[in-house]
């Protein structure tokens, strides 16, 4: 569907298609994130490399939605992010739309910084033990995890209860975007 012709009917993405796109993005991002963080912990044990990985992964969604109108998950499910005029979104709007994912990761950076500078944690040989002990060493991480859960649940509730039938989530409303199906 070309959104330049306003006479064409717009089909808003439904919940399950959006959910599927999200799952596909997780399938793409999670192995890369885990792999790079594993290699970092085993070889470098560097907070700055961790920071680099985090920033790179946090830019995935805003960059792809700005540049291509969709992440890989949205591309695979034939979805596109648009503004209210069904035009391509700019980077600022895409970044605002992604803040729901970016803010929690930024909040976790001080915890990771302390963990990478904690001799008893960084001396561990197990990546999994390192990540498990972070939560018990720095209980504030649990608070951040709770914040993330509440934010995601709120976003889903807003999406599922959208009375306009445009299937808009909280981050769509904040950024003034739609997710629509392409032909």
Image: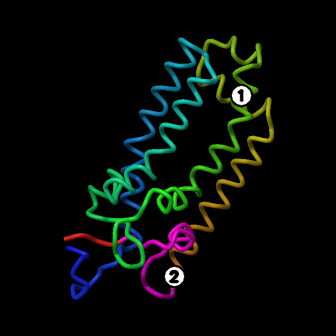
Q: Which residues are magenta?
A: 163-179
The residue nearer to you, when weighing 84 against 151, is 84
Q: Residues within 10 Å of mark 1 (few under 14, many from 20)?
A: some
Residue 17 percent location from the top left of the image: 35, 66
The label shown at residue 162 is 2
- Verify whether residue 168 appears in magenta: yes
Q: Residues within 10 Å of mark 2 (few under 14, many from 20)?
A: some
Residue 153 higher or lower than 158, as above or below: above
SS at badge 2: loop
Q: Quadrant of residue 109?
A: top right
Residue 56 percent location from the top left of the image: 48, 37
Query: In the rendered view, does 129 fall on the left or right side of 39?
Result: right
Residue 116 percent location from the top left of the image: 69, 21
Query: In the rendered view, does 163 fall on the left or right side of 106?
Result: left
Query: In the rendered view, does 119 fall on the left or right side of 67?
Result: right
Q: CA distance from mark 2 to mark 1?
A: 39 Å
């Amino acid at each position: 569907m070309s959104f330049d012709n306003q006479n064409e009917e717009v089909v808003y993405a439904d919940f399950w298609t959006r959910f599927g796109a999200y799952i596909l993005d997780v399938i793409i991002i999670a192995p890369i994130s885990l792999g790079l963080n594993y290699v970092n912990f085993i070889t470098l044990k560097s907070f700055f490399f961790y920071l680099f990985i985090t920033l790179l992964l946090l830019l995935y969604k805003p960059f792809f939605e700005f540049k291509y109108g969709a992440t890989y998950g949205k591309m695979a499910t034939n979805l596109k992010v648009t503004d209210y005029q069904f035009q391509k979104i700019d980077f600022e709007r895409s970044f605002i739309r992604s803040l729901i994912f970016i803010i929690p990761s930024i909040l976790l950076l001080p915890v990771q910084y302390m963990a990478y500078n904690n001799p008893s944690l960084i001396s561990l040989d197990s990546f999994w033990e390192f990540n498990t002990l972070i939560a018990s060493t720095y209980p504030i991480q649990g608070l951040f995890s709770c914040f993330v859960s509440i934010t995601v649940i709120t976003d889903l509730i807003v999406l599922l209860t959208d009375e306009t039938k445009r299937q808009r989530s909280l981050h769509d409303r904040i950024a003034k975007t739609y997710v629509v199906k392409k032909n």
